[in-house]
Amino acid sequence: KPRPEPMKPLNGEQVMTLVDAALKPRFLHLRQYLYAASLDCPLVAVIGAELINSGALVESDLREVADVRTRVFASLLDDARDVRAKFGAQETDDFLRLIALLGPIKLDGVFLEKAAAFLGISGADRVSRLHDALDAVGLLLTTGAGTRVTPDLLSDHLAYDACYDATGQ
């Protein structure tokens, strides 16, 4: 069975075409900001455009590429708002960072016990329920290879966040 060719990264013109297609016409004057933040990650263009189109991102929020990306990551984590309220922000965020660092990983009983001990969560059953809640909101994906954070952009952000402080140290 022939395998499809792997997708190549978008070039600058393709990224701008994506930005233009995702933005509503009245926001096209913001295209350069979104383009700059999206050059190496087209998903930022799509989610960033949705935030701009909905009014959640305004021009003053777009001046720094890092700020645009921060807002995109925050919007992805909005899906976990109810999970964070139920399990606590620290437990939820720590579990997501752990899966981002280790994933894809098989979430068997041994892993759940070790994750509970490592994260200071009261028992494997609670970790399992936390996993189920995050899976239900679409932030985890389980395949034959194991469970990982999705989308990959969020996983990369969480892994970076787990390894570095706000100053990049």
Image (cartoon, grey):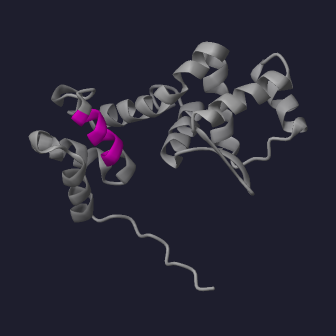
Residue 77 percent across, percent down from the top left: 49, 29
Q: Residue most toward the right?
A: 110
Q: Is residue 82 left or right of residue 65?
A: right
Residue 93 percent across, percent down from the top left: 60, 25
Q: Quadrant of residue 86?
A: top right
In the image, what residue occupies the spot 23% across and 49% down? 35
Q: Is residue 11 above or below residue 167?
A: below
Q: Which residues are magenta?
A: 45-53
| Residue 121 included in the magenta stretch of the image | no
In the image, what residue occupies the spot 26% across and 63% down? 14
Instruction: Tally the marks.
Output: 0
Q: Is residue 42 left or right of residue 141?
A: left
Q: Is residue 3 left or right of residue 44?
A: right
In the image, what residue occupies the spot 85% across and 26% down? 124
Q: Residue most toward the bottom?
A: 1
Q: Is residue 3 left or right of residue 127?
A: left
In the image, what residue occupies the spot 80% across and 41% down? 107
Residue 145 percent across, percent down from the top left: 74, 56
Front in this rendered view, residue 36 or 149: 149
Quadrant where the N terminus is found in the figure: bottom right
Kindly report the secondary structure that dominates the magenta region of the rendered protein.
Answer: helix
Q: Residue most toward the front?
A: 136
Residue 101 percent across, percent down from the top left: 65, 41
Would you say residue 118 is visible in this rendering? Answer: no
Q: Quadrant of residue 100?
A: top right
